[in-house]
Image: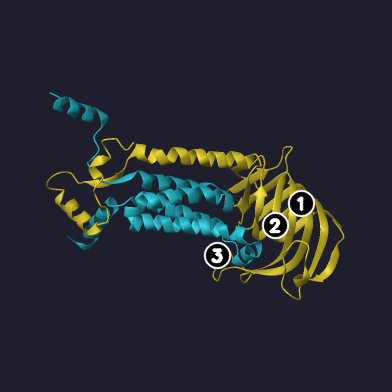
Amino acid sequence: MASSPDVTPSAEHHPENPESGSAPAAAGTTGAPVRRGRVRARRAAVMAVPAALVAATLAVLTAEGALGVQFAISGMPFTVTATELNGTGFEQFGGLDSMAPGSPNEGDTGGQVLVVTSAIKNATLTKLCQSVDLGGTNLLITAGSGAQKVTATDLTTDSTELSGDASFDNIEIGNDASTLTKAGVKGPIGVFSQQADTVRIANLRQTNYATTAGVFKLPGLKLRFSDSGC
Amino acid sequence: MSGPRGLRSAFRGWRADRPFWGGLLLALGGGWILLTMKASLKVVLRVGMQGLAGYLLPTLMVLLGLLVLFHPAQRLFYSLTGVLVSLGSWLTSNLGGFFVGLLLGVVGSCLAFGWLPDQEPRLSRRARKRQAAAAAP
């Protein structure tokens, strides 16, 4: 690449002079054609080819479940469904999420949404489906429909709706949210909460308002646009 | 030499002096990723450093894009860092803003990397061959 004759003429040129750059542009209309910077395709390809390879590798590793990825979607409500969720270290407490002042999503809520925060230390999900309504179309992510399941650590969701058939082991109901210990997350003081050693929810369906954040491993990842959500 | 026309040609001259589209795309990619993950910072802090990295990488993308625009002399370093950070956002920030932001960032970095200042207007391959043939004897 470096021996290409296209590259050498500009080797000594210093690009940092915007004022003098516009002057020849005006003069160029009378005499020789304007000299301006441009993208050399082969030079760009030197970076583009390895970058594309790395991006493809990342996508493949993620789809095989070898690499965890992190999610923190928000501002828009999104739906998560799974046929089965198994988790260890479960906490749940109420909270109030505030939107940014003047947010267009405010509606008649006064900018605040009552949410249930659920935290799970380690979770395994079967047939995960997650959809975000983008207005007219849905962004759909599915994973874990094959033999390998989706695993997540430090999964924290703020949801407005949660449904499913749940069973818990060693559940403690009515703790103060600031004294929770099972999943490493503490809520505000003086708020009702519950925690359990293990949790199992079948036919899980969640409408999450504010957040999930945690590392997901997504074997069999599919990302696509769809007319209908999960 | 009226206002708008003078401004426009000044802008064109400014644009010709730097990898304009490269820097712009890189900054836009970072902005898009930030837009897809405007989760409340409270929760991110609760989740810890991993959550914070999700914000750090797209912010770096915006900064590097702006630096490519306003300090093009160092564009090689900025674009190399930019492409690595863009690829890293796949892991930390919603699959790189659902792939869109990652794509913008990588394309922008490549454009900035491949950009060279002060080039002769490009000749087609045929024209170049003809010139060479004319110069040969």
Q: Which residue is mark 3?
A: A104
A65 relative position to B99: left or right:
right
- Which mark is nearer the camera, 2 or 3? 2
- Neighbourhood count class around disc 1 (C-alpha, 10 Å): few under 14, some 14–19, many 20 upward: many
Residue A230 appears in the figure: no
* Distance between the alpha carbons at the discs numbered 2 and 1: 18 Å
The residue that disc 2 covers is A154
Q: Amino acid at mark 1?
A: Leu
**Dot placed on the residue nearer the N-terminal end, 2 or 3:** 3
- Pinpoint residue A147: horizontal percent, then vertical percent: 74, 37
Spot occupied by residue A74 in the image (x, y as percentages of width and height): 60, 59
Q: Nearer the viewer, residue B63 or A71?
A: B63
Query: What distance separates the C-alpha of mark 3 from that of mark 1?
Result: 29 Å
B111 in relation to B4, above or below: above
- Label 1: chain letter: A
- Who's the residue at 77% across and 67% down the image? A180
Residue B55: image location, x then y, percent: 54, 59
For the point 14% across and 26% down, the residue is: B134
Query: Residue most toward the bottom?
Result: A190
Q: Nearer the viewer, mark 2 or mark 1?
A: 2
Which of the chains is cyan?
B
Mark sitting earlier along the chain (3/1): 3
CB atoms of marks 3 and 1 within 8 Å: no
> Dots 2 and 3: beta carbons under 8 Å?
no
Q: Secondary structure at mark 2?
A: strand
* CA separation in Å, label 2 and label 3: 30 Å
Q: Is residue A21 left or right of residue B45?
A: left
The extreme top residue here reads B137
* Residue B73 as seen in the image, left or right of residue B65: left
In which quadrant of the rendered image does the N terminus of chain A lie?
Answer: top left
Residues packed near mark 3 inside 10 Å, few (<14), some (14 to 19) or many (20 plus): few
